[in-house]
Image: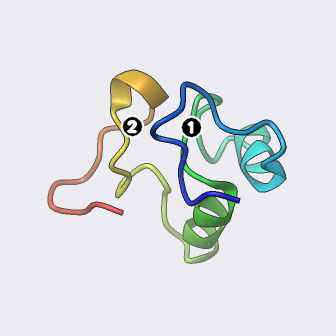
Amino acid sequence: MKTHYFDQETADPDDHQLNMAKMQGYVPPTCLLGGMTVMGIINEGNNPCTGCACDRDKCHGIPPEPNILL
């Protein structure tokens, strides 16, 4: 699995951890972070969108927090 799919239009459909996070509402359906990355951030008690470096026009996530990037 990949850590992110920023260079793709959509995430790989077989990334089951990402699909689960999408279904549970942790990330938007258009999220391009990898499932292992997303689940690791969630397990730490954080929001995967806040430190993500993906272009929000592409993933439609919440705005990133300043000075925090994955």
As measured in the structure, the alpha-carbon distance from the residue carrying label 2 to the one carrying label 1 is 10 Å
Q: Position of residue 21 (x, y in %)?
A: 72, 49
Q: Which residue is mark 1?
A: 31
Disc 1 on helix, strand or loop? Answer: loop
Q: Nearer the viewer, residue 58 or 5?
A: 5
User: Looking at the picture, does residue 25 appear above or below residue 43?
Assistant: above
Task: Judge by depth and name the residue closer to the eye, 70 or 26.
Answer: 70
Q: Quadrant of residue 22?
A: top right
Outermost residue, left direction? 67
Residue pointed to by mark 2? 62
Residue at horizontal 46 percent and vertical 40 percent from the top = 6
Location of residue 51 in the rendering, given as x and y in whole percent from the top left corner: 35, 58
Q: Is residue 60 visible?
A: no
Residue 38 is situated, as x and y percent measured from the top left of the image, at 60, 59
7 relative to 57, above or below: below
The secondary structure type at the circle numbered 2 is loop
Horizontal relation, residue 51 to residue 28: left or right: left
Instruction: Decide: is 51 above or below 46.
Output: above
Q: Residues within 10 Å of mark 2 (few under 14, many from 20)?
A: some
